[in-house]
Image (cartoon, rainbow, N blue to C red):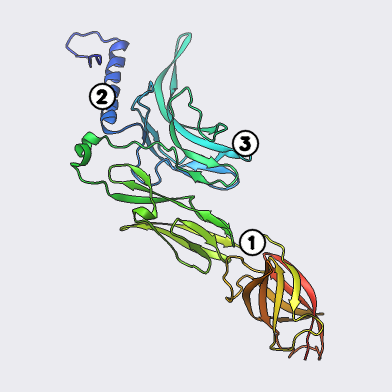
């Protein structure tokens, strides 16, 4: 049986001691916690999609967005408000953790004595600071969070290598059923907002992929991962730069920026993805026709090799990101109509049209150097005009 709820009754002529004031303060705190307990389970009170979410800055640093949680129902601070009034300072993961580790992020309630008051030989504190304490924990060998001695509210985890943020295991303070119709009386919960992780903008290499996760917050404060089966759709503002499939997997196509949108019903959210050229070294294995004899002006040439073009491109489309030129001395002519071709024996193929020699001192049967740029590197091979 729960102990009686008792508070101080004041009357004229009463001599008040410290215990009476402390008891009255505890009564107010206790009643506030009972209201929280009646409203929520323990966890993050998700009023907006960013409340107590994890974001990463750069150089293995993260921060926690401001928000509120309700303390664990098994803690000495049961149902206390855990309030982070401002976004946290940047937390340096590299100072404690290393490659291959998963870092769990938690928050809990903390009280710190403040405003010291000297009383003769001793010092008392006249205030208590209530704070939200962010903690970082290394995952155990199974990748999960080892239960701590102190009850904690789990905010999520971060993969140290990729800095991908996961909300699996995140504790959310759900509204109790009695306040939402007891199992349907209040109608089904509706989607209020969508959060996409990892947050952007993030650099994606051309040809590489990155999986996005859309998490929905509903009108009953519940949170769930959204999928295509539930009506979620993904879109891109520029498919020539980055595409996204029905599962939220982004593929870099060409250098540039694209906005990725997650939509379910009337609710949308966006993130930005910047695509960079792949860090690869092109290698020319062969050229057709070979040299000699070479190729005449306006004739086509197939360059065969590895890392010649963006592998995400289909065949017979412009080879965006690949530049071919013919060089001799100080004179240069850019190749025309550079396009992708179907692979040959596992090698990539890029086709171009021989440019005119007009404006150069080059003559018939001129020997030149064929240069191909891709991914920030250059491959070259001797070639020849066959006019």
Between the residue at mark 3 and the residue at mark 2, the CA separation in whole angstroms equals 42 Å
Q: Is residue 285 above or below residue 14?
A: below
Element assignment for label 3: helix
Q: Is residue 255 left or right of residue 370?
A: left
Between the residue at mark 1 and the residue at mark 2, the CA separation in whole angstroms equals 60 Å
Q: Is residue 107 left or right of residue 359?
A: left
What residue is drawn where x is 21% and y is 9%?
Answer: 14
Q: Which residue is mark 1?
A: 278
Q: Earlier in the sequence, mark 3 or mark 2?
A: 2
Q: Nearer the viewer, mark 1 or mark 2?
A: 1
Image coordinates for residue 77, horizontal then vertical, percent: 37, 23
Element assignment for label 1: loop
As drawn, the label of residue 31 is: 2
Q: Nearer the viewer, residue 61 or 28?
A: 61
The count of marks equals 3
Between the residue at mark 3 and the residue at mark 1, the CA separation in whole angstroms equals 30 Å
Q: Which residue is mark 3?
A: 95
What residue is drawn where x is 37% and y is 23%?
Answer: 74
Question: Is residue 90 in view from this perspective?
Answer: no
Q: Residue furthest front?
A: 345
Q: Earlier in the sequence, mark 3 or mark 1?
A: 3
Q: Earlier in the sequence, mark 1 or mark 2?
A: 2
Q: Is residue 344 left or right of residue 176?
A: right
Image coordinates for residue 138, horizontal then vertical, percent: 56, 33
């Amino acid at each position: 049986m729960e102990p009686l709820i008792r508070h101080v009754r004041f009357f004229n002529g009463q001599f008040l001691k410290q215990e009476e004031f402390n008891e009255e303060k505890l009564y107010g705190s206790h009643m506030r916690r009972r209201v929280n307990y009646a409203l929520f389970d323990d966890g993050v009170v998700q009023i907006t999609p960013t409340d107590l979410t994890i974001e990463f800055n750069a150089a293995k640093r993260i921060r926690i967005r401001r928000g509120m949680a309700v303390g664990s129902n098994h803690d000495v601070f049961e149902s206390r408000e855990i309030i982070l009034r401002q976004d946290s300072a940047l937390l340096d993961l590299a100072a404690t953790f290393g490659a291959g580790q998963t870092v769990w992020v938690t928050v809990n309630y903390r009280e710190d004595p403040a405003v010291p008051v000297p009383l003769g030989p001793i010092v008392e504190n006249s205030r208590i600071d209530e704070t939200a304490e962010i903690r970082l924990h290394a995952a155990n060998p199974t990748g999960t969070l080892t239960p701590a001695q102190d009850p904690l509210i789990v905010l999520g985890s971060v993969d140290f290598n990729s800095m991908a943020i996961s909300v699996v295991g995140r504790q959310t303070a759900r509204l109790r059923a009695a306040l939402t119709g007891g199992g349907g009386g209040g109608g089904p919960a509706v989607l209020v907002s969508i959060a996409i992780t990892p947050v952007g903008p993030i650099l994606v290499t051309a040809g590489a992929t990155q999986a996005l996760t859309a998490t929905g917050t509903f009108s009953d404060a519940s949170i769930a991962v959204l999928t295509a089966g539930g009506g979620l759709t993904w879109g891109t503002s520029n498919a020539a730069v980055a595409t996204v499939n029905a599962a939220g997997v982004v593929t870099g196509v060409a250098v540039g920026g694209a906005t990725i949108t997650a939509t379910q019903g009337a609710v949308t959210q966006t993130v930005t993805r910047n695509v960079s050229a792949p860090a690869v070294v092109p290698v020319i294995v062969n050229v057709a026709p070979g040299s000699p004899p070479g190729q005449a002006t306006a004739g086509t040439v197939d360059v065969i090799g590895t890392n010649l073009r963006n592998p995400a491109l289909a065949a017979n489309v412009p080879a965006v990101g690949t530049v071919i030129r013919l060089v001799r001395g100080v004179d240069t002519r850019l190749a025309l109509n550079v396009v992708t071709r179907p692979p040959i024996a596992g090698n990539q193929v890029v086709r171009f049209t021989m440019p005119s020699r007009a404006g150069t001192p080059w003559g018939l049967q001129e020997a030149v150097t064929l240069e191909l740029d891709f991914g920030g590197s250059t491959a070259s091979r001797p070639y020849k005009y066959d006019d």
